[in-house]
Amino acid sequence: MADAPRRASWAAAVLALAAVAAGCGPRSVALYEKVMGSPSYERVTESATRTREVHDGLDTRFILSATWLSGPWLSSFAEEYSNIYYLDKTRREQVISHWREESEKYVCFFVALFVPEEKGNNLEKPGTLWSLRLVRADEKDFEPVYIRKSSLRPEEISRFFPYSGTWYRAYEVAFPREAGEPAASPRAGSPRLKLVLSGVEGRAVLAWQ
């Protein structure tokens, strides 16, 4: 009988913990999303991302992935970035302002490229053998205003662009604003934008409607 009070006390403690857990449920989910990220950012990034693998038989020549850093993506990224780093609105604007300013001036992409021979992964270098162009629906093509290595740290690249793996090299690419304007005479069946990477290893085309 001496065990009865202990059992009653233990049961009460379990019920109390259950009540606390139930009461904190939504807050726990919110905290998880702040640390791990919310599903909405993942969905927006997936919808803005295209990937193409180029093979020669069983050999991989290269893999190209790119995310169009459009207005909807930028808004989602700003929210995701501030949630992860617990930034208030002012601090968030300071951090995101660079990305926003670039997207307002240019048509911007985050590009990840895998090439088996790492020395051939050199899109940003003047003497590169690669050609990267953005093609509008009227088939007018534009060369980049700049191609540079990503300003994000490796851990941030893995977090915000998970398709960019360890063996990829990440770039920030900008094209003239004109390239993103609706074409006056679009070619029938042509997508709104095509990102075309050509080189001695082959050719890859990524398309956005």
Image: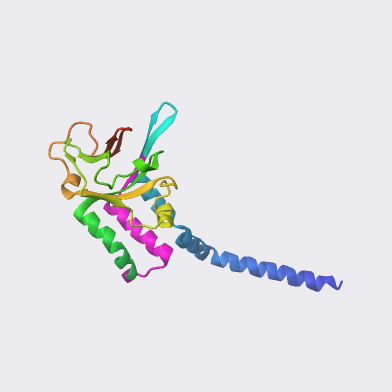
Q: Which residues are magenta?
A: 64-90
What residue is at 69 percent from the left and 67 percent from the top?
14
Q: Is residue 134 visible?
A: yes
The main secondary structure of the magenta stretch is: helix
Instruction: In the rendered view, tell whether residue 39 sits above or below residue 21.
Output: above
Q: Nearer the viewer, residue 73 or 66?
A: 66
Name the residue at the top extreme: 57
Check if residue 86 falls in the magenta segment: yes
The x, y position of residue 95, in whole percent, is: 32, 65
The x, y position of residue 170, in whole percent, is: 35, 49
Can you say which quadrant of the picture contains the C terminus? top left
Check if residue 101 falls in the magenta segment: no
What residue is at 33 percent from the left and 44 percent from the top?
66
Q: Is residue 50 visible?
A: no
Q: Horizontal placement of 120 versus 6: left or right? A: left
- Dividing the picture into quarters, in which one does residue 97 lie? bottom left
The x, y position of residue 184, in whole percent, is: 12, 40
